[in-house]
Amino acid sequence: MQITITVNGKPHTHEVEPRTSLALFLRETLDLTGTHIGCDTSSCGACTVHLDGAAVKSCTLLAVQADGLKVTTIEGMANGNEMHPIQAAFKEHHGLQCGFCTPGMVMTAANILKENPAPSEDEIRHGLEGNFCRCTGYHNIVKSIQHAAGTLNA
Amino acid sequence: MGTYIGQSVKRREDARFLKGAGKYTDDIKLPKMTHSAFVRSPYAHAKILSVDISTAKNADGVVAIFTGSDGCNAFGIPTGWQVDFKNGDTMREPKHPLLAIDKIKHVGEAVAIVIAETQAQARDAVQLVEVEYEELPCVTDPEKAMAKGAPQVHDEWTDNRSFDWCIGNDRADVEAAIAGAHHVTEMEFVNHRLAPNAIEPRSYIADYDVNADKYTLYTSTQNPHLIRLLMCAFTLGIPEHKVRVISYDVGGGFGSKIYHYSEEALLTWAAKEVGRPIKWTSDRSEAFLTDAHGRDHKVYAKMGFDKEGMIVGFLADEFCAMGAYLSTFAPAVPTYLHGTLFQGLYTTPLIHLNVTAPFTHTVPVDAYRGAGRPEATYLLERIVSKGAKEMNIDPAELRLKNFIAPFDGVKQPGYQTQVALQYDSGDYHTILKKGLEKVGYDDFRKEQAEARKNGKLLGIGISTYIEACGIAPSAVVGSLGARAGLYEVGHVRIQPTGKVSVFTGAHSHGQGHETTFSQFVADKLGIPMDDVDIIHGDTEHVAFGMGTYGSRSLAVGGSAIMKSIDKVLEKGAKIAAHKLEAAVEDLEYAEGKWTVKGTDKSIGFGDVALTAYVPHDYPEGVEPGLDFSSFYDPTNFTYPFGCHIAIVEVDADTGKVVIKRFVAVDDVGNVINPMIVDGQIHGGVVQGIGQALLEEVVYDENGQMISGSYMDYAMPRADDVPMIETDRTTTPCPHNPLGVKGAGEAGAIGSTPAVVNAVVDALHHLGVTDIQMPVTPQRVWKAMQQN
Ligand code: FES
Ligand code: FES
């Protein structure tokens, strides 16, 4: 099937097998390997991207379902060399260790803050329910998102 | 503190990770690369009657299919430790084939590999391989594996033992002390099986260059050199210099990526057979079935106390599962990394641990964050707290009473335990007191009593731990059965312009070595951090190394780098002396330059570096260049210790446990980067909480793993845990140049018993004295009803 998806602002037209997940399409066809795959049950959130502005797990979505839509991946978050305030906050507050969950965390964090610009600690933790991190114990991820909220609201 | 040492320098690795530009193995694509998938056994124990690949071979995109009889199984996967039987008999070490030959020993064992143009095609063709099995009875529980008539995992022996082992004082003496004790506390429990669950699944790409006769293996490993060594010398029998192992970014390890796995060897072998690169990336279900698990001990223990509450004897018998085969470190985990910690922080005069290590029809068990030490700490800290309750002594007071007195390892000697180790330095009273103060122990007891009146169940749990890190002195581990040395290599190359490249055999998979190592190198050389680069994870660049595990990177790897820095400065001084026309003894080195003492005559590090490479005006008898490599073999383990305290609330109606506060006071020796150390503690603590409350690998009676996905295996999520309140004391390690002890595992070691102690404390007035982990709402609710 031929599909056109606008990824990080650029339209991409490709032939895909109907069963190809959006995650695989991003990684294999577009070489956007920042979107990671950590599970096969839609549980870990490493694959989180934005589809028309809302966070989705790209492993559970078929590429064909995104036909005609806009996708933002982690590669589209920074403005050139200047990191997005959420990315900057993760660096400043050590919100990542191995980095594998990180793209999904950043994309989810953006979604949390979009829906609720000043979330409480509890609200952040609930918002992260669908994202696993095995390294940080979530402590500094929560802290990073709290600080990012501050910057974005400033 | 220096310019950088002791500072929370932000990590240099973060930019690439945050932009999605990390280079994990699955991100790599090679020209003409093929993909692979495995045919895996659905049975735990079965005979393979036939394997039919005829249909699969002709499926779309299939390049090749190999089974166990196709020549990959000449040698098999070795283990790295040999723990012989108590009576001197040799450890039983079954052959571990890359692909099962005629018998299956655990669910998920690979029977065939399918190589195809795409991953989807490989997975499709797997479905077309027809394997006929004859299912046989199985055993997955280590204690049941030792029962008479239990199904045999390996037919060549008369029972399932791989080995048995003991440590400590004479058993009869320990039993006598306990028999004569004023009070005896007993425990029986399972330290249950866990799946490490690094979020990046294992991934490998193997490539063979026929013209150079050279293999390259890209692998998500914690120790590239060891994988190369084991694979070349044992598994495949290929020349080591013809193999390059690369592990760029690795998405977490926690032990599970230390080991030499069959898939990486098989891919390496097959890459030559098919003449094209082959990639395999595990999916999560496969990860549950094939990554080495952790823990799985059945424990029976007794601790005797005298009238004053002093421990007089400690005895334990354990059944510790090895799984179907011996994984790389497996035999060391329930023995030398476990029994040697049975002293804990206490002056216990008589200790004995007896271990029986059987094979079971499960995936192999190996080191998982803490490796043997969390198991030791859990037992010790639970039994001491249980004893305190039974004797009606405050658990903090009982600990303080029994603690070893402070010693710094310099003025006071190290502490010789009853279980082989000599602790290097420690001050256990101070750290517990600091923890109690931080949590507000006395106030909490009042709050708890008040809450109880209102039907609210609050509990506090204390755990104090010691661990042995920085593994390890090669001669010591050699005498304990290690088949490798456990030194580290640090290579410091000063470039002609004075910039510095450091090559380390340690491997970073989240620890931030690129940052921490640069910090101390820059400080020791007195140069800017930006002038230092850290290179790891490639056997072609780094001379050798033993990798990262056992919280050893800085204590052992950092020390190796320090040795090379010393050599650089020593040679640099000769060059500087020549240039300054002074004697070496008259020079001092500070802030990146050599100065003639008492004068303003000096020469900078960069000028000396340049002189070393452009040696026109040069001291006689000195070689050009400024480039040193060192091996550092530690003289002892390092012994971090700490105090973790959890406050929990148990819902009286549902049994759900909520952690209200978690205080972790740890002493990891000197700290190079506090931000990174705290991060390690946070992560470890939450993994330990995961074990206490949530996670468990469950096999049913047919050997099926019924917790083999994230829908069934409860990983700790952000809303399961609180913020972790960290603090520190600092007792430098007296025997390594940086005075560091290691921080990677501490969190996972201290936290589990703290949480369970807190739950029991919350329920104790209801008659609950112990509760099996994971402490699920169902278990808590049942315990509350039974009493
Ligand atoms: S990979 Fe999509 S949720 Fe795990
Ligand atoms: S940083 Fe490693 S999984 Fe989150």
Image: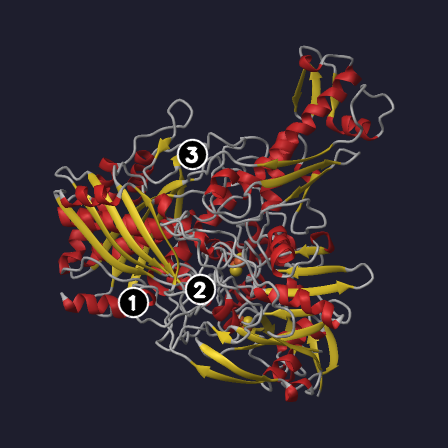
Looking at the image, tell me whether mark 2 or mark 3 is earlier in sequence order.
Answer: 2
Label 3 – label 1 distance at C-alpha? 48 Å
Q: Chain of mark 2?
A: B
- Quadrant hosting residue B205: bottom right
Q: Is residue A74 visible?
A: no
Kindly identify the residue that appears in the image at 24 percent across and 58 percent down: B188
**Kind of residue sitting beneath label 3:** Thr
Tag nearer the camera, 2 or 3? 2
Residue B323, position in %: x, y? 43, 64
- The mark found on residue B195 in the picture is 2
Quadrant into which the N terminus of chain A falls = bottom right
- For mark 3, what is the residue? B730
Disc 2 is placed on an element classified as: loop
Q: CA separation, marks 1 and 2?
A: 26 Å
Disc 2: CA contacts within 10 A as few (<14), some (14-19) or many (>=20): many
Q: Position of residue B40 (x, y in %)?
A: 53, 77
Mark 2 is on which residue type? Ala
Q: Quadrant of residue B781?
A: bottom left
Q: Is residue B598 above or below residue B245?
A: above
Asked which secondary structure carries label 3, the reply is loop
**Residue A37 locus on image (x, y percent):** 58, 70
Q: Is residue B21 rendered to the left or right of residue B487?
A: right
Taking the image as shown, residue B759 lies to the left or right of residue B473, namely left
Check disc 1 and report the residue beneath it. B147
Which residue is most to the right? B616
Determine crowd level at label 1: few under 14, some 14-19, many 20+ residues with C-alpha closer than 10 A. few
Q: Chain of mark 3?
A: B
First-in-chain label (3 vs 1): 1
Check disc 3: other Cα within 10 Å, few if <14, some if 14-19, many if 20+: some
User: Callout 1: helix, strand or loop?
Assistant: loop
